[in-house]
Amino acid sequence: MALTDITRPSDVALNTDLYELTMAQGYWESGLVDGEGCFNVFFRDAPFNGGYAIACGMGQIADLVENFVYDEESLAYLASIPAPGGGALFKPGFLDYLRNFRMRVSVWAIPEGELAFAREPMVRVQGPIIDCQLIETALLNLVNFQTLVATKTARVVYAAEGHPVSDFGLRRAQGPDGGLAVARASYIGGASSTSNVLAGKIYGIPVFGTHAHSWVMSFPTELDAFRAFAASSPKNCVLLLDTYDVRQGIQNAITVGKEMEERGERLSAVRIDSGDLAKLSKMARAAFDEAGLPYVKISASNDLDEYTIQSLFAQGAPIDSFGVGTKLATCDPQPSLGGVYKLSATRETTKDAWDPVIKLSEQAYKRTIPGVQHIRRYYDAAGVPVGDMIVDDSVDMGDASSMVNVLDELTSYDLTDATPVELMVKLVEDGHGVGEAESIEASKARCREAFMHLDPAVKRFLNPQYYPVGLERGLARLRNELALEEAKGSGRRSRA
């Protein structure tokens, strides 16, 4: 499903990596159609060398599942794909299976806009293993990028210290769908508006924009251009000052501002898009105040990010709002989240108990967590989150008030005085969305509330404090037991 268009639902199913389909055919031929799997989406490191992420993209998962079908045109294309060794890649019987295919998975996830941390499951998918495999790529495509954008935006908004931030990134985004994903995720992450008109139509996000340098260059003088724009858009008049010379631009804007006052109108703001933003914004503020126009706001743009904005305020820049484009849309300097989708449990039928499985890898860093996992987030008396415990209800809890660090079994955390809250919620049951779809405003509000309560030490940009993520002690023991079994080459992934 392209974010822009769901008029062809079958495109959803083909928005995948080929190996998902070759594996599905293998499961079908191996008689594993009724076999079930449990998969988890997680990331190994918080993005931007930070201490957290903002979960995003979950609000579109139900649509993804419900629209996951193969029509005749899609099946004809699959039938035409050749196998490298000759003949057709996909067998007629398997294509017949896909002809009547409907997703039967159930999905749980961290609510959209909520805080997420490294190694814990952001999304859990359970159901027929073929279904779980087929949805992998499209699901990661939804969650990875939007989580990255929402996190980047939260950082920018945090640096902006309550001043509005607008998404200006469409023209630098990764294509039309990328631009829409940026607008959606950045709004959830804290942006006040977007320049993307289509995103405004689809998602109900406030849109914002005034004029470019080309407007000024199209008139005989800058003053003529400012007067024409004020006449055309008196209720949305933000004048761009740096087409030629900011100092003269300020004087021309003051002239137009006073002319607007005489007509009972007001110049809303001016924008500076180049040069020393701290110096020029101070110059503009002083000039407008002296001219008796203290209500005129100052907006800044020009390759901004959280570090630049933080530096501007450290220099005392009197900037009221920010337009952030390239570095937000491209998530500079980290272009991907690196979220993965890993199998953690299997069972032959729905009547069987789950059999936890583990991936060891050549790198200990990539060792997975077994079992059907969910998260308990613990809060102190002030409502500050102090730790996340990964739990499998089928494992004996033992001491439920402590957990073992997810990467270091010698480090544990005492959560006796904290209050646990179940974090993951069910989004899909047996292929169908659960309840009413949540609004983008609800996700945005959740992000604002969660971020407000996060310890500032975890939010800081340089060397953030580690937020504790751990395993319930019984689950930690299970992981060690399975790891030992696999290391011995037993080939038996059963619960000890």
Image (spheres, rainbow, N blue to C red):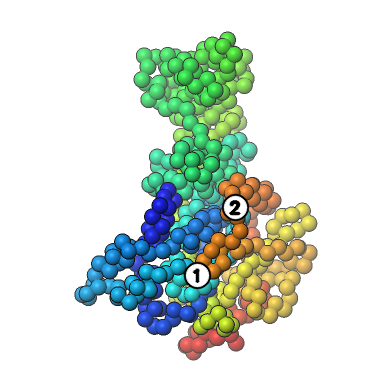
Query: Residue at 60% across / 55% down in the picture?
Result: 436
Query: Which residue lies at the image location 45% right of the left edge and 65% below the top edge?
Result: 135
Task: State the mark number for residue 438.
Answer: 2
Horizontal side of 112 relative to 366 (left or right) equals right
Q: Quadrant of the N terminus?
A: bottom left
- Give the spatial CA distance, label 1 vs label 2: 22 Å
Marking on residue 148? none
Q: Is residue 134 left or right of residue 357?
A: left
Numbered tag placed on residue 104 in the rendering: 1
In depth, the one of 371 and 51 nearer the eye is 371
Q: How many marks are shown on the rendered structure?
A: 2
Q: Is residue 5 above or below residue 492?
A: above
Q: What residue type is disc 1 on?
A: Arg
Q: Secondary structure at mark 2?
A: loop
- View extreme (left): residue: 86
* Coordinates of residue 363 in the picture (x, y in percent): 47, 73
Q: Residue at x 28, y 73 (%)?
A: 89
Residue 327 position within the rendered picture, expressed as x and y whole percent measured from the top left: 46, 43
Q: Where on the picture, by quarter, is residue 428?
A: bottom right
Q: Quadrant of the C terminus?
A: bottom right
Q: Amino acid at mark 2?
A: Glu
- Where residue 54 sits in the image (x, y, percent)? 57, 53
Dot 2: within a 10 Å radius of its alpha carbon, few (fewer than 14), some, or many (20 or more) residues?
few
Residue at image coords 70%, 60%: 386
**Residue lying furthest bottom:** 490
Q: Viewer-proximal residue, 72 or 229?
A: 72
Query: Is 164 drawn above or below residue 470 in the view shown?
Result: above
Labels 1 and 2 touching (C-beta < 8 A): no
Q: Tag 2 or tag 1, which sits nearer the N-term?
A: 1
Name the one closer to the observer, 98 or 178.
98
